[in-house]
Amino acid sequence: MKTAIVTGCAGGIGFATVKKLTAAGMKVLGMDICPSADVTEKFMDFGGCFKYFSGNLADSADRKALLNEAKAFLGRIDILVNVAGVAPKVRNDILEMTEESYDRVMNINAKGTMFLSQIIAKDMLSNELCDGIRGYIVNISSMSAYTSSTSRGEYCISKAGVSMVTKLFADRLAAEGILVNEIRPGIIMTGMTSTVKEKYDNLIEGGLLPIKRWGMPEDIADAVYVLCSGQLKYVTGQSIDVDGGFHIQRL
């Protein structure tokens, strides 16, 4: 049985990922910032193949505690899926962005992803090779990694950072049998986009996307599964756009 850690597991993409991996027979430890009592019912159907850990990805002590919990519950860590991320609390013009907002977004999205990947990768090095592979890391970044949005610049910068984290770890860990890839979601129907739903409804209807619909969390979860399923053993450092074709430069 493969094992996995999924951060941001209480949100749309994270929850869909937990559901996909457990349905595939994996044992999963999920992390999110919500108190355990608030999500008990949400994860009830997963039974003994899932355990929830409440913690703050930006906090070093919580990251170390997550590793300890994973060793106790999973035994061996085969997969890390870095989903956890936040948007700015207020969408401000980049000329009005505050340092507090920048630090909050960067500490969770970029720093948290970087240093959780570091400690989990070190642990994965002790895994036995299986068909040339010791483990998988999948980072969830965003179309915002390469698309300017001047009302949430801190988010764009953080996701561009996640893209470089992916490349750095892919480069360092390839020889160790650990594959590291990135998924760049497009416009996905989650809590993060709920406040701008009308805006994106209109843009999609107006032809923004070749595939003319909202993306769903399950679209991202499906891509995560493929990347850590063992079917793509010669792929690392890759950015996969799951965005309905948004990335295509069109006239």
Image (cartoon, helix red, strand yellow):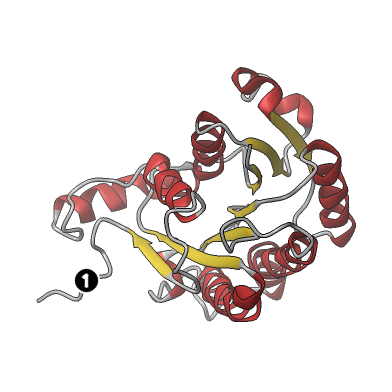
What is the crowding at mark 1: few (fewer than 14 residues within 10 Å), some, or many (at least 20)?
Answer: few
Quadrant containing the C terminus is bottom left
Residue furthest out toward the front: 131
Q: Quadrant of residue 64?
A: bottom right
Is residue 169 something that shows in the picture?
A: no
- Residues 15 and 131: in front is 131
| Position of residue 188 in the picture relative to residue 40 (left or right) | left
The total of numbered circles placed on residues is 1
Quadrant containing the N terminus is top right
Residue 247 image position (x, y, % from top left): 28, 69
Q: Quadrant of residue 30?
A: top right
| Residue holding disc 1 | 248
- Residues 73 and 250: in front is 73
Residue 204 image position (x, y, % from top left): 21, 53
Residue furthest out toward the left: 251
Which residue is found at the position 60% from the left and 61% from the top? Answer: 133
Is residue 81 something that shows in the picture?
A: yes
Residue 2 image position (x, y, % from top left): 63, 42
Which residue is found at the position 29% from the left and 46% from the top? Answer: 214
Residue 213 image position (x, y, % from top left): 22, 46
Q: Amino acid at mark 1?
A: Ile
Question: Which structural element holds mark 1?
Answer: loop
